[in-house]
Structures are given as C-alpha cells and as structure tokens.
Image (cartoon, helix red, strand yellow):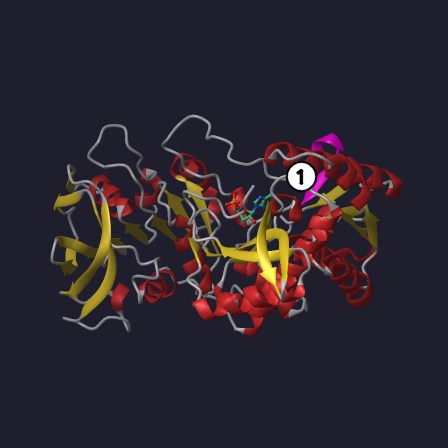
C-alpha cells in the first residue's frame, strides 16, 4: 500500500483515486500526523501532495524526515516536490504567486517514471503549478522533464527512487498522469495491484463479522446509495442480525419509497421496518418557510422517529452508517477558525452517542465511485447504484416557502417528467445532479382560450466532482423546450418553467 501525505492541495483526493484505479490501496494522512502514522503504516512508497504554502517561508509544513531515511520510493508533486528538494539539501526560492495552467512538458532524459508512457524527447500536455522554484537541486537528482517556464518540471534520483513533479499527474488535464502514477506505485514501489472491489468485499465482510460477533445491528436507510450498499454488505456478512429502518419522511421523490422497500424486502429479503412518518413531518413543517428551521425540524424529527423505532426493535448494540472516505479524511486547513455554516446538513451524526451504540461503517475507506462499484459487485441494480445524490431533507428544500401536500405532489410529478426526459436524452450520467424546484410564485399564462394562474417551476442541473463546486449544465435549448412543454402539458398547477444558470459558488446546488 501507498501513503499519501497531504499538504492541503485541493486535489489530494484525486491522487488517492488515481492510485486506487491502478489496483493499489492507499490512504491520505495530513502532514501534521504523518510522523505518527508512517512507522506502522507498512507503506511500499510515499506520495507528497501539493499545497498552498511556500517552502521558502518560515514554519511551513515538511514531510517527516523518517520518510527519506526509510529507503522507500518517494514521489513529490508540486509543493511535495519543493519540500522534498529542500529536505534533501536543495534550494528553493519563492516569490512567485501560485498559478495553474496547461503546459507542454519536454522529456529530456529517460526515467522509470515515464517508461511506456512518454518517449524520450516527446512533448506532452501537463497541468503545471507555478509557485516556488528550485534554484539548486539536491545531490543525486537530475532533470528529466522541462517546460517553457519550468526548468525543473520533472526531476529524478533514479538510484534512490525519488521523483519530483512540478505538474499535477492526478488531474484530467494531464492526460497520461494516471499512467505515470501507475508506473510509480507498481513498477517503482513494487505494489502488485490486486486491490479490487471483489477483494474489498471479502475483507469488509470478515471485518464486520469480527466486529459484530453475535451482536445485533440497526441500519438507517435513507433511500440513497451509500446506506443501501452498507446495508446489503452488512446483511451479507451477518444475515438477519441486521435490521434496517427506513424513516419515510414523506419528502421523497415519486415512487422512491416503494422502490427502496421493494428492493430490500423483495429482492434481498433483508428485514426492513418501513416507518411511514409523512404526517408527523408534514404537520411539524406546516407554515414553516425558513430554510434553516425546515432543515433543523426534519433533522430533529428524524432522530426522534429513528430512536423510537430502534427502541421497539430493542437489543441492538451497533448502528450502521454509510460514512464515506471523504467524510473521514481530516482536511488540512490553513484558513484557521471555524467555517461559516451555509446549511445545516441532515444526517444521523450524534445518534450513536445518544443511543449509546457502537458504529459499523464498512464504507469508511471508499470514495463515492468505489461505493457504486461495490454496489454493483453486490448485485444492486445499475439504475439504483448510479442515482444522483438526493439531500436528506428531501423535497422540503426544493419547495422554497411553506410546504403543502399539494405543492409536493406537483413537484413530484414535474420532477419525474424532467428526469424522464434527461434519461431519454441519454444525459443522466453526464450530470451530477438534476431536479426540479417549485417556486412559491404564481404567474399568469394562457392555455387554449383560457387564462391560467399557476406556479413557476425551476429546473436545475449541475456538473460537479464532489458537490463542493458546481457548474450549471449547458443543455441544448431544444431539450429544455421539450422538457418544459411536457411539464406544462402534463402537470396541473405549473404554467411556466425556467432554467437555473447559477454555478456554485456563488449559488449552492440546492435552493435552500
Ligand atoms: P449544496 O446545496 O450545499 O449541496 O450546494 C451540496 C450537495 O449536498 C447535498 N445536500 C445534502 N445532502 N443532507 C445530505 O445528505 C443534506 O442536508 C443536504 N443538503 C444538501 C446536495 O444535494 C448536493 O449534492
């Protein structure tokens, strides 16, 4: 396995994903705990990530010296290259503000890193990061790649297996970057590359059995992919020692609740308690139009209802959650101070302490796309596994203003037609998330010979990598026209459709 030391780059997680794509397991640790983790981690190689600091400044982060004393191969990327150069006796100068850009890399000498990927003297597209620059290389290194503005774009000490890149091999703008990383982890570090979802499934099952023993587990299903995959995996490990609880808040999309229930009871035969709590949620939300109050009300009720059901089942000492790796990675922050709450997210955090239960989190090591392939491995239908993310508070936050059953029904119908059109156009998998929002505004229209006075519906679709930033999806106008016409013709209560062309930032993906 490979250890990735994080210096705070925005794209450190991509390094991990690229490494895992080569079939090699890896983990990310922040630079400030790396010294503790490294000695017992059992790494066959180390990757140093990029980061926003300047090596030439006082007190900026360094890799543990033990990494260089261990004799293991090291790949430094961007900031990682700089700190490696400096820690091994080279000289690094700052003063250039950090900027990213496309560049041509000239291969000037052969390197094990480039084997089978880049030929000698070839020019190759890379995504460069300019900031610090090396003015004197450490002993033993030589230049293997240059670009117009970067004389030390790629350096190597082949005998010690040290490599430094000023560009980012992990991003898509370095088209062959994944192959360079594969060369590093497989050929240079000697990792076999047999880490696969099938292997992960077996390991995870063994771990769950060991943790749970004869105990009983409760798993809250949200209708989303993560909790479903966690539940199916746990069921495979311990069978009917697992009970799933699906708190149906009545804010799901059209046919969604039935789908979940049928999948679990019908297809997998997993014990499932379906709590139809729609009335409880809707009456608590009545007349409420403030987004944060809506979110907090839903979060509080969810915990109460779940807790009550768990008590009825009784005797469970474990609570299963579909926590993913990005939630677990301690992010390296240079900003200091707590960040502002934009939205209170609804999740089951806090439940285990309240209920005095131990957590079972079999997806803690996985990224979202890996959870999807594990889901496929476990036989979950493709259409279920590939679903767009759906927020915990459901349609409540897609109905700005106060929520009524009538509005929810209109929104459900319109949203289903919109998604149907997206699927028909073959766009579903190109979009991170698409949904309709029912605005609390009525406008005048004309249909046939009559006047209408009905709601406005907004359509939203974004592309994103992780939901942190997003771009609106650039639909063809014909598509939008088609979807709008169908919605207005088929859904009573909507007479006007608009498209949201806001990116995130400054917008958020959801409207509330
Ligand atoms: P925003 O609207 O903050 O959303 O740009 C980013 C991503 O998070 C989802 N989202 C939630 N997911 N509980 C969730 O599990 C929530 O309370 C919640 N609110 C937003 C949103 O759908 C998008 O994918």
Report x, y in % for residue 124: 21, 67
Residue that appears at 71% across and 59% down: 254
Q: Which residue is drawn at 50% across and 48% down?
A: 509
Which quarter of the picture shows residue 79? Answer: top left
Image quarter of the C terminus? top right
- Tally of numbered discs: 1
Camera sees residue 363 = no
Is residue 246 something one can see in this rendering? yes
Please state the horizontal and vertical placement of residue 226, each as a whole percent of the image.
Answer: 63, 54
Question: Vertically, is 365 above or below 270?
Answer: above
The span picked out in magenta is 352-360
503 relative position to 76: left or right: right
Q: Which residue occupies 11% across, 58% down? A: 148
- Asked whether 60 falls inside the magenta stretch, the response is no
Q: Is residue 202 above or below residue 343?
A: below
- From the image, tell me which residue sits under label 1: 402
């Amino acid at each position: 396995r490979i250890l990735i030391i994080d210096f705070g780059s925005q794209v450190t997680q991509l390094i991990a994903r690229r490494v895992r794509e080569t079939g090699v397991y890896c983990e990310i640790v922040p630079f400030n705990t790396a010294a503790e983790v490294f000695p017992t981690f059992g790494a066959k190689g180390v990757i140093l990530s990029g980061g926003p600091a300047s090596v030439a400044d006082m007190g900026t982060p360094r890799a543990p010296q033990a990494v260089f004393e261990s004799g293991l191969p090291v790949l430094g990327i961007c900031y990682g290259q700089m700190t490696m150069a400096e820690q091994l006796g080279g000289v690094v100068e700052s003063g250039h503000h950090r900027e990213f850009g496309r560049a041509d890399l000239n291969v000037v000498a052969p390197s094990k890193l480039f084997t089978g990927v880049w030929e000698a003297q070839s020019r190759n597209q890379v995504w460069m990061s300019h900031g610090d620059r090396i003015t004197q290389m450490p002993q033993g290194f030589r230049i293997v790649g240059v670009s117009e503005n970067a004389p030390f774009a790629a350096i190597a000490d082949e005998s010690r297996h040290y490599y430094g890149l000023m560009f980012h091999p992990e991003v898509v703008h370095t088209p062959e970057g994944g192959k360079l990383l594969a060369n590093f982890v497989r050929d240079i570090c000697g990792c076999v590359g047999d880490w696969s979802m099938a292997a992960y499934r077996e390991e995870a099952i063994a771990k769950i059995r060991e943790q749970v023993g004869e105990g009983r587990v409760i798993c809250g299903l949200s209708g989303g992919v993560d909790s479903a995959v966690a539940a199916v995996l746990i069921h495979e490990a311990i069978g009917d020692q697992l009970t799933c609880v699906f708190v149906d808040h009545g804010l799901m999309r059209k046919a969604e609740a039935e789908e979940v229930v049928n999948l679990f009871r019908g297809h997998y035969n997993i014990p499932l308690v379906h709590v139809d709590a729609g009335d409880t949620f809707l009456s608590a939300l009545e007349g409420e139009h403030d987004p944060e109050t809506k979110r907090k009300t839903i979060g509080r009720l969810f915990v109460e209802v779940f807790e009550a059901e768990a008590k009825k089942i009784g005797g469970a000492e474990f609570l299963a959650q579909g926590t993913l790796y990005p939630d677990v990675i301690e992010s390296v922050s240079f900003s200091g101070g707590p960040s502002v709450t934009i939205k209170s997210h609804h999740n089951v955090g806090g439940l285990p302490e309240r209920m005095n239960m131990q957590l079972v989190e079999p997806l803690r090591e996985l990224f979202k796309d890996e959870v999807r392939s594990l889901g496929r491995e476990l036989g979950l239908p493709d259409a279920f596994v590939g679903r767009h993310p759906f927020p915990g508070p459901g349609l409540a936050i897609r109905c700005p203003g106060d929520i009524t059953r009538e509005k929810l029904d209109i929104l459900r119908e319109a949203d289903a037609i919109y998604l149907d059109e997206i699927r028909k156009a073959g766009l579903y998998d190109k979009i991170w998330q698409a949904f309709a929002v029912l605005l609390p505004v009525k406008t005048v229209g004309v249909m046939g010979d009559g006047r209408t006075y009905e709601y406005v519906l907004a359509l939203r679709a974004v592309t994103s990598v992780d939901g942190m930033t997003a771009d609106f999806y650039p639909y063809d106008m014909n598509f939008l026209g088609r979807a709008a016409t169908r919605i207005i013709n088929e859904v009573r209560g909507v007479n006007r459709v608009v498209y949201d062309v806001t990116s995130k930032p400054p917008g958020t993906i959801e409207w509330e």
